[in-house]
């Protein structure tokens, strides 16, 4: 390799790193402002696919939380039927094994572990677990880089991205929990208001009844007073 060719490759790699840093910066900003977790996951995945030159990818989350089943919640370049039917238990297949080990994996042709074998031929893939404070949340998968094989630097970047994704998922859960609590409280408040309005209506009716009774009492009191006077 001559000097000019090496400089060209170095410049290409430099530009790639700039794009990667821009992606990380963008995700940091979106974590603060996003309101929809599905949209955030899809945007994050598409950004990772673009920056790392992958042909397809997915983000699989543990569903339901705390269980042991991975389901696709964001995808790119995958057929719809694959997305709809994809489901892996922890320890099953590539994503399941990554989730079980909780460490990222570079996957090439020489897949020795039988648990990594799939119906399709895996030529180049990268899979990284998504973990937040010790809790396994899911796995991010990228497949078949167009220009070259994935390497350790790509694995490092994807680990950084999954930390951001984990923070976003935690925030998304907090937002969703707050929304559910707000919805329940609003429903309770509406029920209480309806009950109070009903009680107020009954109170007003009772007050009117009391006023009628009070007037009759006063009228009878005056009548008795009149009738009790001496005759003559």
Image (cartoon, rainbow, N blue to C red):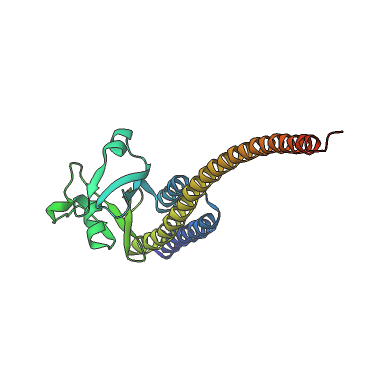
User: Quarter holding the C terminus?
Assistant: top right
Residue at 31% x, 39% y: name it: 83
Residue 150 is drawn in which quadrant?
bottom left
- Left or right: residue 157 versus residue 184 is left
- Left or right: residue 210 versus residue 82 is right
Residue 38: x, y in percent? 44, 45
Residue at 79% x, 39% y: name it: 225
Residue at 73% x, 35% y: name it: 220
Residue 32 is drawn in which quadrant?
bottom right
> Which residue is more in the foreground, 220 or 129?
220
Position of residue 86 relative to residue 159, above or below, is above
Residue 157: x, y in percent? 39, 62
- Left or right: residue 231 versus residue 144 is right
Residue 101: x, y in percent? 23, 62
User: Quarter holding the N terminus?
Assistant: bottom left
Residue 209 appearing in the image: yes
**Extreme front residue here?**
232
- Left or right: residue 46 versus residue 211 is left
Residue 78: x, y in percent? 33, 39
> Which residue is more in the foreground, 175 or 194?
194
> Which residue is more in the foreground, 215 or 105?
215
């Amino acid at each position: 390799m001559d000097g000019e060719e090496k400089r060209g490759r170095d410049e290409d790699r430099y530009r790639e790193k700039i794009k990667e840093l821009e992606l990380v910066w963008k995700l940091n900003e979106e974590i603060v402002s996003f309101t929809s977790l599905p949209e955030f996951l899809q945007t994050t995945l598409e950004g990772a696919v673009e920056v790392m030159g992958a042909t397809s990818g997915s983000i699989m989350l543990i569903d339901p939380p705390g269980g042991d089943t991975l389901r696709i919640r964001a995808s790119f370049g995958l057929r719809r039927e694959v997305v709809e039917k994809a489901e892996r238990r922890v320890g099953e297949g590539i994503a399941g094994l990554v989730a079980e080990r909780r460490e990222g994996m570079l996957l090439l042709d020489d897949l020795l572990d039988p648990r990594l074998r799939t119906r399709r031929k895996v030529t180049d893939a990268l899979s990284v677990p998504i973990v937040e404070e010790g809790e396994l949340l899911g796995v991010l998968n990228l497949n078949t880089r167009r220009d070259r094989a994935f390497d350790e630097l790509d694995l490092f970047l994807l680990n950084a991205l999954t930390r951001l994704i984990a923070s976003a998922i935690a925030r998304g859960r907090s937002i969703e929990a707050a929304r559910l609590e707000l919805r329940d409280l609003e429903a309770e408040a509406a029920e209480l208001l309806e009950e109070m309005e009903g009680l107020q209506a009954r109170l007003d009716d009772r007050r009117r009844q009391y006023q009628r009774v009070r007037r009759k009492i006063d009228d009878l009191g005056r009548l008795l007073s009149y009738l009790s006077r001496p005759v003559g």
